[in-house]
Image (tube, rainbow, N blue to C red):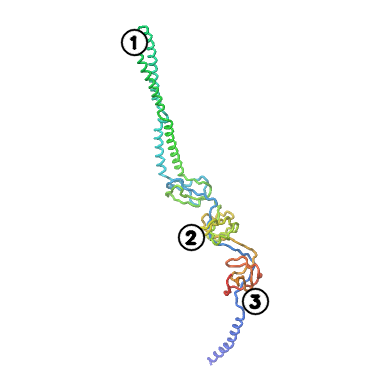
Amino acid sequence: MRKQNILIPLLIVIAVGIPLVIYYLSNKSDSPQFLLAKATRREIRVVVNTNGIIDPVDRSDIYAPIDGFVSRILKQEGSAIERGTLLMRLDSEQVRTALAEATAALLQEKRQARVVLAGPSKEEVTALDASAAECEMQLDQTSKDLAVEQSLYLKGATALVSVENLQKQRDQLQLRLENLKQKKRDLEARYSPEDKEWEQGKITELTKQVGLLEQQLQMGSVFAPKTGLIYSLSVKPGSYVTKGQLLAQIYQLGKIMLRAYVDEPDLGRVQKGQQVRIEWDGMPNRQWAGLVEKRAEQVVPLNSRSVGYVLCTIDGEPKELIPNLNVKVEIVIARKEDALVVPRAAVFNLNGQPTVMLPEGTGTVLKPVVPGLVTPEEVEIVQGIASGNSVVLNHGEFTKY
């Protein structure tokens, strides 16, 4: 009896359930089974998504003026500084040694050139003048004595030999006086103008060398060339630097621009004046706006990419964006606010004609359309359907648009 009580209800359920399932399946097969979306009016934007880096607008690079060691750094990265602020000191043993050697050489050359440039010493000239004056006095006296002797000889009051001796003395004194005068002339003309010019040139050259070395030693103190913020410091205390090596970089806070890395295939679509949107992972809830300022002038390799550097302005001089930040970039190539938009999966090519599929009754109907702006996800429909029309998605039997 118990088995019969269980079996009878089971048979009733089977008898009633099977026809219901058959009816449901038959009705389900008669109704169309499509994934649909509606054509709606809203903004559509065609964008180029890439990355970029923040650059200062007016950057000042500070280079090492001499070879030497960084003995002291007084300002660190992030420090706000005024023009003329002492940033660091460089110590160059090479410059100090060269300056000492050049100074010693200059002093030695001045000593050697003194005789050439100043002429004979006062003592030498005075001695020659005194000898010449004494000789002139003796010559004058001898000439007078000779005149007296000659007068006496004519009167027969003296011998001829006395006259001849006085004449000999006079001649000797005249010769000696001429020799003294010539010696003075030779002394004064000991060095020619060319000799003096040569010595003066050596002194001038060594003086310049000493001055330059002193200037280089002073340049070991590195000062800020302008007011701004240190955003890059390339050396540490104790580092050895060579002349011309980059030491630090300064910029004015907020004075920044964007260098966007646009892939080669997208460069032709980027034009001056297009809107730019910037995002930074460090502040995920913030966005910054800007404009394309300058198109890329060349294509350069960047890791595994070929890109062009597109320069963009940034609105508002944001101080939170600092140089060398890596940011995400969206460049708006085209934009329409009130566009009729459908998912891109709803549009396909039928014999070269952009087409959509509309549901109709238990089936579908094909509708040619005129597309406008196209993004990877959406298509603007300029002509062919109306707002609110449903379109069929994911129909794999046609070529995707």
Task: Give whichever of 265, 315 is nearer the camera.
Answer: 265
Q: What is the C-alpha distance between the residues marked 2 and 1?
A: 120 Å
Q: Nearer the viewer, mark 3 or mark 1?
A: 1
Q: What is the C-alpha distance between the residues marked 3 and 2?
A: 52 Å
Task: Give whichever of 357, 202 is nearer the camera.
Answer: 202
317 up-or-down from 375: above or below? above
- Which amino acid, mark 3? Glu
Q: Dot 3, crowdedness within 10 Å: few (<14), some or many (≥20)?
A: few
Rendered image quadrant of residue 38: bottom right
Q: Nearer the viewer, mark 2 or mark 1?
A: 1
122 on left or right of 400 = left
SS for dot 1: helix
- Of the residues under marks 3 and 1, which one precedes in the sequence? 1
- Which amino acid, mark 1? Leu
Task: Give whichever of 114, 93 is nearer the camera.
Answer: 114
Residue furthest toward the bottom?
A: 1
On the image, the x and y values in percent for residue 47 come to 58, 62
17 on left or right of 156 = right
For mark 3, what is the residue? 360
For mark 2, what is the residue? 303
SS for dot 3: strand
- Which amino acid, mark 2? Asn
Q: What is the C-alpha distance between the residues marked 3 and 1?
A: 167 Å
- Of the residues under marks 2 and 1, which one precedes in the sequence? 1
